[in-house]
Image (tube, rainbow, N blue to C red):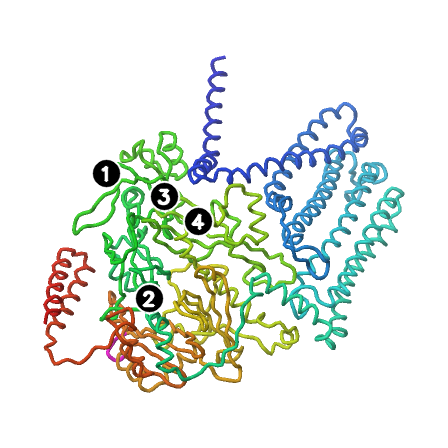
Amino acid sequence: MKNKILNTVLISILLLVVVFFVSTNFIINVQWFKEVGYLNVFFTKLIAICKLFVPIFTLYFGVIAIYLFTLRKSIRSLVGDTKFKSVKKYFLLSNLVISMLGAGATATTQWYKILQFTNAVPFGEVDPIFNKDISFYVFKLPLVQSIFSTAISLIIILVLITVIIYLALGFKDKIYQNKDNVININSKTYGIRKFAGKQLAVLASVLSLLIGCSYLLKSYNLVYSTRGVSYGAGYTDVKITMIFYKIIAVACVISSIVVFISILKLKFRPIIISIASIAVLIVLEPVVAILTQQFVVKPNEMELEKPYISYSIDATKKAFNIDEIEVKEMEPNENITSEKLEDNKDIIENLKVNSTGPLLSFYQQVQLIKNYYEFNDADTDRYNINGKYTQVFVSPREINREAMTTWQNKHLRYTHGYGLAMSRVNSVTEFGQPDFVMKDIPTVNTTDINLENPRIYFGESDNDYVIVNTEGGEFDYPTGDTENTFNYNGTGGLKMTPFNRVLFSIYERNPKILMSSSITSESRIILNRNIVKRVQEIAPFLTYDSDPYIVVHDGRLVWMIDAYTSTDKYPFSEPHEGVNYIRNSVKVVVDAFNGNVDFYVTDENDPIINCYLKIYKGLFKPLSEMPEDLKEHFRYPQDLFELQSKVLTKYHVDDPIKLFTEEDLWDRSLEVVKHGGENLSQGDEGKEESILNKAKENKNNEAENEGLYLMTKLPDEENVEMMLLDYFNMRGKQSMVALLGARMDGDNYGELVMYKFPPQRTIYSPILFKNRIQQDPNISKEISLWAGKGSEVIYGDIIIVPIEDSLLYLNTIYLKANSENSMPEMKRVILSNGDKIVIEENIEKALLKLFNYNSSEENKNSNKDETPKTETTSDNSGVKEAADLFNKAIEAQKNGDWATYGEFINKLGDVLNKMSQE
């Protein structure tokens, strides 16, 4: 008796341990979703699955039970009355298992489709063939097709059950061995027709009926056809394939009746004829379609396919939100006058002279401070700095997890990044280095931007958990040879109660969490610190941009992430990168200190986001609740812009005949990414690979020119604004035919503007401008001179901006010594307009030489270091001494010798003061 009790206790404990281990993920998920404030989102899926499981299980169980009930007489006659009761138990158990597995699989795979079906929001647009609202294809048709597929699977399961029961129960009685040792089944006495003939007849009839219905549903898939010259149903699909599908559906209905009657009457010939007829129709359809396409459509393809091409053009433009682009014609004037420059001095003041690649390389050399920090990316944004609207590069300083070698350092000590580096886009120092407005640790801030809390616990590279508020504190920032510590006082993380310490030891498979004496009851564990993974955990049904960016807001740092709603079910819209409809409907804000996540709806007209609003109560906030100063940092997402640019290479036309003849196809302009050992910086470094951003190099080391964020002014506009620009050329040629701009400031956010150039003229594209630079004798001579001295020549971004009715071309050149720790410095500016091209030390000199434009004091570039140096007769020893002190200070900074760094900076200040008094 005692042994039984002991065994029962041990088994109970073992079961509890197993349940605890199995439920660890569930318990942690519940705690985490509660912490971030989206517990209802977590339970939306769980509740939906549970709600679906019960009726689906009842349906499965009921259908199988009823079917088995119809077999009871046959089973009893096969096994006898004495065994029938015991066999019933096995049937009941088998039905339970099959129904639970089937219902579980159906509920877990179809819950989302069911919620979309029941919460569908109309698009207000219909397809041109079936006149169905687009919501039918996006939200409803996938579920209907899944239901029919499930029903067909259920019929097949019932047939298999019948065969298995028949073989399992009567196997030994039905098989005999003849004199030739050949095994046969005695079909006359125990044949399966006699066992379940009526049931199989019904099943075969229903299966035929379901196949017929599936062909009717298959007709709707023709709106995604790729047979014709354009995407979507074409002439052959509508006139041939669709009719065949309807005939096959009718044939299947007739066949279901024939099969049912014939099986009951043991007449197999009608069954064979009906099945053969359907098979012939199925085989005949593609043959007739191919012949029609070849001999009817091909000779008259333009005329017959014209309406269907129009459908594809209209649908693709609407689906990718490029149907309302403001298109303007521009005939570039090749002569920019000094008067025109003076009238557009705000464009000149904001010309982009820094490029992301060299800038990020400089940041990593000078601003890391310690090797346990890293800069993953440098993003472009704009701020009002000391009363001036200024475009800047911003790069957060995050912890480099790869530099941590011990568990304590990785998870307890080095828990967060610190601050950021911010520099002007439109200026460099006298040495060609970034013009910082925020830098160093602690943050040296020369702006009026308030940054009180620079700590970054949530970022782009924070993939590991950390435990904060531990004994000894966390490393905060270095001061010389000492380390300042910090105790986390934010709201993020889960309390490390004794229960949670056990829980997370199991979850992370690391007993140190349980055993470490540094962890106290006040400690907190912070999970999902990578900002993209964090938002994906909450809302995995959204697609996220590959380039989050950090914003200084209300004295702290927050991340902004663009999120997309998308589908591949939009009729007649040609897919690109796996989607054929996309909207930037959500802006996500993640607090870099607390980890708070807010989803703001930015496109209230998007039916997909409105469907999500109905499904996920409390997840999304209206845009009106977002702080106004955050809205000022909205960027038109580069991934979306580049996808739209790719679509526009084909679908910029409205005339179906032009699309058919392919006489007006474009390419996004190319740019050399590496040429003869000379590197070209292009776009944002550190961007994650995205389905929306997959530029590849060709065999000539050329890649599509990435869209660039520039501060410029459109013709006919009064103020400069930050825009995203991209350039196009005619396919197979390099002359530029169009410029596309995305606006993003204020009420203009989301507007797309396109300037088309005369195709008969040669307008320099980025690749032509780059080739021109390399072919210019004066420029190539200077570059060769640098390369011959062992310096690496790096080309910056190629900038093409409109100035009224003219185009101004800009490129910068960086030099970098061929040593491991060398820093790229901007040494030359190349400026061009029309056939004229110059290379000078800075913008001011280039403008003076190219246009004879000499700005007055109030008009000159915002960077005072870029103004042309004037010749003087005074002794320049002070300048040399200042330069020497500066270089020594930088060297000390790179070595982490902050005392020496401060000493040289103080001496530098004395020299500069002395020079200013002379």
- Does 347 appear in magenta? no
Cα–Cα gap, marks 3 and 4: 17 Å
Q: Which mark is residue 425?
A: 2
Mark toward the start of the polypeptide (3 vs 4): 3
Q: Quadrant of residue 360?
A: bottom left
Mark toward the start of the polypeptide (1 vs 4): 1
In percent of width and height, residue 445 lies at 25, 56
The magenta stretch spans which residues?
A: 787-791
Indicate the amino acid at tag 4: Met
Cα–Cα gap, marks 3 and 1: 21 Å
- Kindly give the residue lying farthest to the top in the view shown: 1
Instruction: For residue 403, say whether it is visible.
Output: no
- SS category of the residue bearing label 2: strand
Residues at circles 3 and 1 in contact by the CB criterion of under 8 Å: no
Residue placed at 48% from the left, 20% from the top?
7
Indicate the amino acid at tag 3: Asn
Cα–Cα gap, marks 1 and 2: 41 Å
Residues at circles 1 and 4 in contact by the CB criterion of under 8 Å: no
Report the mark closest to the observer, 1 or 4: 4
Cα–Cα gap, marks 1 and 4: 38 Å
